[in-house]
Every structure is written in C-alpha cells, then in structure tokens.
Amino acid sequence: LDETKWVVAYIRSDGPTEYVIYDKPKQSITKLFVSKPKLLKYKFAEMEDVRIPAHDGLELVAYLTRSQTAEPTPLILLVHGGPWARDSWGFNARAQWFANRGYAT
C-alpha cells in the first residue's frame, strides 16, 4: 500500500453519495459511481445542524431539514433511540419525504 490513490466519498445531505478516486501524485480525480444515481434528477432540501440550549446549560445537537419555502411550516420531531444511538448528518430519505410535503424535520 503506497497510499498514492484514495477512494473518496462525497457525502451530501441533499443527494446521494458520490465516490471518486483521487490520484495524489497526479492530483487528479476520477469518478467511480453514485450510490443512488436515479436520485440525481431530483432537487432535495439541505440538512443543517442546529444547537439547542438545554435547561442544564448544555447544548443539544440536532439536524434540521426544512421544506423549501419561505413560509413557516409545521415541524415533525424525529426522536432517536436514546443515549446508545444517535442520528448523523447526511441524506435522510424520510426527512426529504416530509420536506417535499411542506414539513420541517
């Protein structure tokens, strides 16, 4: 392993993950594949991380996907599985489904 070529994943919150090979000596990128190419034709909402101050002074980290509108929208709170599980930033099909129908999650 000479580490001259890397496989790089571009993880996005508003679309599928794209994989490329980075050739370090040539400083070039070669596209490999997209995880879900059928999704490329759609426009999705971006996920943003938000920090919510808790009563004990600590911050709660949350991920927010908003409907693509300037108007206020209802919010659906998706609660994760407790202290042993957590959500992560990235494409979330369920959040996109709700955002497409006018909800923030």
Image: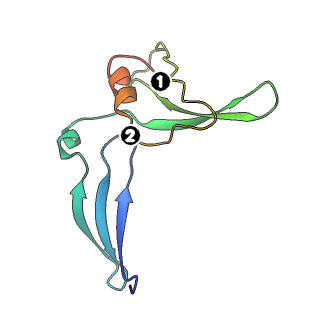
Left or right of 50? Residue 27 is left
- x, y percent for residue 77: 52, 20
Q: Amino acid at mark 1?
A: Thr
Residue underneath mark 1: 105
Residue type at mark 2?
Answer: Phe
Farthest-out residue, front:
84
Q: Is residue 16 above or below residue 92?
A: below
Q: Which residue is mark 2?
A: 91
Quadrant in the picture for residue 3: bottom left
Q: State how far apart marks 1 and 2 are (Cα).
A: 13 Å
Say which label, 1 or 2, has the lower sequence index. Answer: 2
Q: Position of residue 96 (x, y in %)?
A: 35, 29
> Residue shown at 32%/50% (left/top)?
17
- At 45% across and 15% down in the image, what residue appears? 71
Residue sitting at x 60%, y 30%: 82
Residue 86 location (% of width, % of height):
55, 37
Q: Colour mode?
A: rainbow
For mark 1, give the secondary structure: loop
Q: Is residue 15 left or right of residue 70?
A: left
Residue 8 badge: none
